[in-house]
Amino acid sequence: MYRIPPDEEESKDDPSVPLAIPCVACGEKVSKKTTECRQCGHPTHESVAAYKAAMNVLKEARKRVEEERKRVEED
């Protein structure tokens, strides 16, 4: 059985990650509380990491759009 590294174990309780997220390997919904995807067996902690990375990219993109919107309004 696959064991989650200790630093990734805390991602199970991370409130910024929804309980069900897409599996990074197959796209099926997977619970962040499980160790692997029931559909394909891919480790869940990798899907959590991918979800968090995608949310950070989205957050940065929204920030850039807002900054550009403000710059255009000022001109």
Image: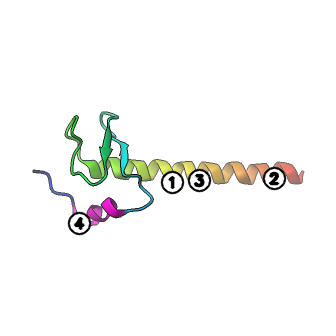
Residue 66: percent from left, percent from top: 72, 52
Q: Give the Cα distance between marks 3 and 2.
A: 16 Å
**Label 1 Cα crowd, 10 Å radius (few <14 / some 14-19 / many 20+):** few
Q: Give the Cα distance between marks 2 and 1.
A: 23 Å
Residue sitting nearer the eye, 30 or 7: 30
**Label 2 Cα crowd, 10 Å radius (few <14 / some 14-19 / many 20+):** few
Which-is-in-front pick, marks 4 and 2? 4
Disc 1 vs disc 3: Cβ atoms closer than 8 Å?
Answer: yes
In the picture, measured across the screen, residue 43 lies left or right of residue 61, that is: left
For this orientation, the residue located farthest to the left is: 1
Eyeballing the image, is 25 above or below 63? above
Q: Amino acid at mark 1?
A: Asn
The secondary structure that most of the magenta stretch takes on is: helix
Q: Amino acid at mark 2?
A: Arg
Q: Earlier in the sequence, mark 1 or mark 4?
A: 4
Eyeballing the image, is 46 above or below 38? below
Residue at the (63%, 50%) spot, across then down: 62
- Secondary structure at badge 4 equals helix
- The magenta-colored residue range is 5-13
Disc sitting over residue 22 in the figure: none
Residue highlighted by disc 1: 56
Disc sitting over residue 6 in the figure: 4
Residue highlighted by disc 3: 60
Disc 4 vs disc 2: Cβ atoms closer than 8 Å?
Answer: no
- Secondary structure at badge 1 equals helix
Q: Give the Cα distance between marks 4 and 2.
A: 44 Å
Residue at the (31%, 52%) spot, across then down: 32
Q: Earlier in the sequence, mark 3 or mark 4?
A: 4
- Secondary structure at badge 2 equals helix
- Secondary structure at badge 3 equals helix
Disc sitting over residue 71 in the figure: 2
